[in-house]
Amino acid sequence: MAEGMIYNKSDFLANISTRLGREQSKQVTRPDWKHRPQLEILKEASPEELAAVFTKNSMEKTTTVIQTNSARLGEVLLDTFAKYEGGRIVATKDERFSGYGLDVVLADSGAHVWNSELGEENIEIAKQAAIGVFFSDVSLAESGTVVQFNDKDIARSVSLLPLAYVAIVPKSTIVPRMTQASQTIHKSIGEGKELSTCINFISGPSNSADIEMNIVIGVHGPIEAVHIVVADR
Amino acid sequence: MAMKIGSKPFLGRVDEALQDDFMRKAMSSAQDRLRGKKMLATVEDELVGDWEEWRSAGEEIRRHTLENLDFYLDQLSENFSKRGGHVYFAATAEDATRYIQEVAKQKNAKKVTKAKSMVTEEIGLNEALEEVGCEVYETDLAEYILQIDDHDRPSHIVVPSLHKNKEQIRDTFRDKANYTGTEEPKQLAAFARSQLRETFMQADIGVTGCNFAVAESGTISLVTNEGNANMVTTFPETQISIMGMERLVPTWEELDVMINLLSRSAVGQKITTYVTNLTPQLEEDSVDAPKEFHLVILDAGRSKALGTEFQSALHCIRCAACVNVCPVYRHIGGHAYGSIYQGPIGAVLSPILGGYEEYGELPFASSLCAACSEACPVKIPLHEQLIRHREIYVKEKAKTSEKLAMKAFGIGASSPSLFRLTVKGMPAMMKPFVKDDSISGGPGPMKLWTAVRDFPAPGNSNFRKWFDNHKKGGGTDG
């Protein structure tokens, strides 16, 4: 993509500098923050403890959690699909599916694997789908959150349009909280790596409390969510 | 101005609100629930640690960012445009709407979907888009309810339709959108889902606000629960995000802290269901991502607070924690403020953004109990700023009679003998209004107080007399 336009910047920023009573800052160093309570949370937790906290907090948000290992993952996935009685399945295009030997499971289930060359057809399929299945890139114990780094293959629609999302959560992706995910992203920006166009933190089914503060599960996004926690190989 | 709600004067709006029993009941119940949820997720959540530390962290980050706002906005705009996004710095609301209208015209846009955004309310974006032939669809459930109800205005920063109950919403849906279901929230929400599903897919432009922009990466972060912001930013070919110029953080590390403060303070959640972080698409290769991304950075009066005692008002992250503890908001509700920004932060921000002429009376809608300052996750000294606003208002904008009264007081207080005379004369001056040792229909500024409650009549003694007597070892007369 060509570089974008910036309009009216110099006048706008000059006004800010004047109001702040100084010349425009050309270089600013972030301070060493005095208060960093985020680093204390679950800092001593073992992978097992993190998985337990992740499970508890996922369930708090009405997400179904299934614990399994890589050998049984295919079977668990098939069982999960079966609960949606033959509804259409859409999956992200992700090498990890074959890494876990799940290609066959997806093929046998008639799942549509996202193919950006097919264009809008992918979206039409996702709209009709009962299940969208994807891998979590980072998983947050504190809030039962799965994270997607979306791109043309890890499509945004997969976790958004189907009635339910099913996230496969390798245990090694579970970190204490958003702090660790943010640190990783910050580090990769510092290393000049390109940031994903959408980094999506998702914590269970969509919901709203806008009507008399009553929680309603399932508004514009999925109505149900499943997190399958997989012990690493 | 689109920030303004209603045309009645402030006290007229307050009177109206005080007579609306349903609204007051809805407000107090919502306040209790929101506050209760916040407490569970903050001071009562053992896992989160010391909440005061979090508040200090938030304050520290916001202070540094605002002190270096020009630098971080420069960095944000450069990083956003490097990725192919377009940035428009808008000095005024009119500049912002004009630019967005131009984009809509260029794109020949007919349908626009919107995620909830107070800043778009502030600049009157819906009306501006309708002027250039766009149909605008609010997609947040609360905003959708307001839009269907003949564009009713928001009464709360986080839950704009807080003043409506489910029966009213059912009736509105029935009358305006042929809804045939019950008042069950689940059915009402399902109706909104079905009504908006295709619209999301057909929209030409998706419009969002911005909870935080991240300077180091040119990212816009959106905090939602319903999934509508994801729908709005996934399917239209063009995305336009509008941010108040103060809504940014230096890096992802600070974003983490601010998201935690916002989620827990606003809705009592450890994190909102969606935290969606959007950066322009480097390669136009995704099927489900906008091809064009515009960021509008808005001043519209904010810079007037920079370098003044009100600078920290710009630290606000729009969580409404102050609104949810305010005893005045509890009684008068959101609409009485006459601004889309209500409660203590509304009473501080509205005069800054919209001027004392329009909003100078709002800082008086406070008991100065300081509950707001204590609730604020970034430690804005709200009640102190309310007092400062009052001082400025009285000094510069007060009505002639109040000015005279204050002037008279100033003169009286500046001369010890005159002061003694005034205080001594008070019982006699008030005599016509006194009944059973209290005043029930006082003159001038007392009229407002005595309209709803009695005021104790000044006794024949006073503090100075009492103190003199006390020094001499006398009794506690008075």
Image (cartoon, coloured by chain):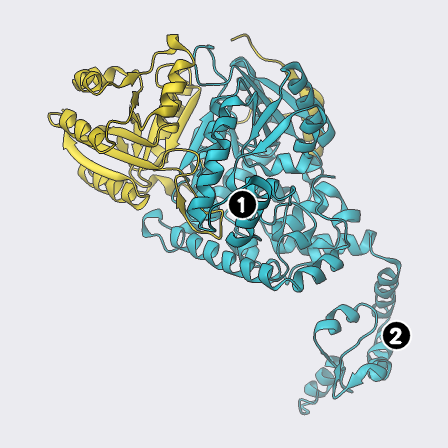
Chain colours: A yellow, B cyan
A156 or B83: nearer the viewer: A156
Badge 1 or badge 2: first in the primary sequence: 1
Query: At which x and y percent is residue B51?
Result: 41, 50
Residue B7 lies, with reference to residue A220, above or below; the image says below
What crowding class fits label 1: few (fewer than 14 Cα within 10 Å), some (14-19), or many (20 or more)? Answer: many
Q: Chain of mark 2?
A: B
- Same chain assignment for discs 1 and 2: yes
Instruction: Please identify the residue farthest to the left as the structure is shown.
Output: A71
Label 2 is placed on what type of residue? Leu
Query: At which x and y percent is residue B140?
Result: 52, 38
Q: Tell me if A41 is positioned left or right of B366 in this view.
A: left
Q: Residue at x 46, y 51 (%)?
A: A213
Q: Determine whether the residue tagged by mark 1 lies in a helix, strand or loop.
A: loop
Q: Chain of mark 1?
A: B
Residue B352 in view, yes or no: yes
Q: Residue at x 51, y 41 (%)?
A: B141
Marks 1 and 2, how far apart in space? 51 Å
Q: Tell me if B15 is positioned left or right of B334 in this view.
A: right
Q: Determine whether the residue tagged by mark 2 lies in a helix, strand or loop.
A: helix
The residue singled out by tag 1 in the image is B158
B355 or A211: nearer the viewer: A211
Q: Which mark is residue B418?
A: 2
Q: Residue at x 30, y 35 (%)?
A: A225
Residue A197 lies, with reference to residue A117, above or below; the image says below
Label 1 is placed on what type of residue? Val
